[in-house]
Image (tube, rainbow, N blue to C red):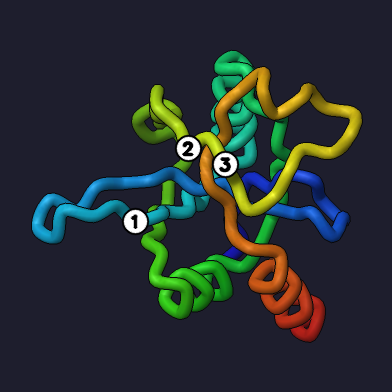
Amino acid sequence: MGVFVLIFNVGTENEGIHTVRIGDPTKGVSRNKILMFESEDDATRFTLMLEAQDFPVPTVEVMDAEEIKAFCESAGYDWEIVPANGALIMPPEVNVEETDWQPESNTRDTDDFLVEEEVPNSDLDRIRRQLEGLL
């Protein structure tokens, strides 16, 4: 099943996938979670809310849900499928200050905004190769 995820710097060596950091009260630690939107419109609305918070604007990309789930399991990330036309998902108000990727030069300086943590490029490259192999 295809789902829509948010990718920063698509097609560059500096790609990053959008995650939200969630708390785990039983362990006193936080984890990263990838949101997988069933609806492209819902994913686009979420990007607009990120932009309103002065985030760099991510690109909505379609990916295979099973590939994202497998990646999350291997990386220790959580995932959530956001149903089409479901409850409006809001970005968190507090975000991490440093990411594994950096905005491209045509975006604002990183001192101007806070961004959420993203997936390392090597993992995205592996997923991309696996998805290309399915075509």
The circle on residue 31 is 1
Mark 2 or 1 closer to N-term? 1
Counting the numbered discs, the total is 3
Q: Residue at x 56, y 28 (%)?
A: 114
| Residue most extreme to the bottom | 133
Q: What residue type is labelled 3?
A: Glu
Q: Which amino acid does label 1 sit on?
A: Arg
Q: Do the residues labelled 2 and 1 touch (CB within 8 Å)?
A: no
Secondary structure beneath label 1: strand
* Percent x, y of residue 127: 68, 74
CA gap between label 3 and label 2 equals 6 Å
Q: Mark 3 points at which residue?
A: 98
Residue 38 visible to the viewer:
no
Question: Which residue is more in the foreground, 12 or 86?
Answer: 12
| Residue most extreme to the front | 111
CA gap between label 3 and label 1 equals 15 Å
Q: Which amino acid does label 2 sit on?
A: Val
- Identify the image quadrant of residue 13: bottom right
Mark 3 or 1 closer to N-term? 1
Q: Could you tell whether 127 is left or right of 12 in the image?
A: left
Q: Residue at x 72, y 82 (%)?
A: 130
* Mark nearer the viewer, 3 or 1: 3
CA gap between label 2 and label 1 equals 12 Å
Q: Name the residue under label 2.
A: 96
* Percent x, y of residue 103: 77, 38
Q: Are marks 3 and 2 in contact (CB under 8 Å)?
A: yes
Q: Residue at x 70, y 37 (%)?
A: 58
